[in-house]
Amino acid sequence: YEAPTVFYIFLKKGQSMAVSLIWVLFAATLFFIGLKKEKKWFKISAFILFGVVLFKLFLIDIFSMSALYRVLTFLITGIVLIISSYIYYKFGKKA
């Protein structure tokens, strides 16, 4: 199954949330790989993808999802961003 289909089966109308969450998890993965391997372009790609996700959240998802899905998406995205910023602060000072 694709992630949006799985989210649709379990949460109904969760496809947009699934795409946002998958993108933010992919960006976090890129970010952590960039820190571990000290590759600057991984970190820059992660920041760009984080920006795209936030843009999508604020301009597209806010109008297309119900309140519950909106809150869940913003909450999970916020948690991933906070964890990423903490790890960057702790381990990424060379960037």
Image: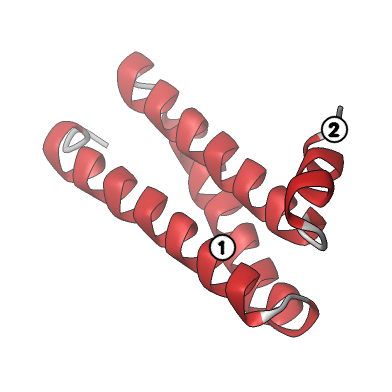
Q: How far across and how far down the image is residue 55, in percent?
A: 64, 71
> Which residue in the protein does label 2 denote?
2
Q: How far across and how far down the image is residue 93, in percent?
A: 16, 38
Q: Which residue is pictured at 69% across the width and 68% down the height?
A: 56
33 with respect to 94 (left or right)? right
Q: Amino acid at mark 1?
A: Thr
Q: Earlier in the sequence, mark 1 or mark 2?
A: 2
40 with respect to 95 (left or right)? right
Label 1 crowd bin: few (<14), some (14–19), many (20+), radius 10 Å: many
Q: Which residue is pictured at 46% across the width and 38% down the height?
A: 28
Label 2 crowd bin: few (<14), some (14–19), many (20+), radius 10 Å: few
Q: How far across and how far down the image is residue 65, in percent?
A: 74, 75
Q: How far across and how far down the image is residue 5, in percent?
A: 87, 42
**Residue furthest toward the front?**
10
40 with respect to 7 (left or right)? left
15 with respect to 32 (left or right)? right
Q: CA distance from mark 1 to mark 2?
A: 18 Å
> Which quadrant would the N terminus be assigned to in this image?
top right
Q: Which residue is pictured at 71% across the width and 79% down the height?
A: 66
Front residue of 68 and 26: 68
**Residue furthest toward the top?**
37
> Which residue in the protein does label 1 denote?
73
Q: Quadrant of residue 64?
A: bottom right
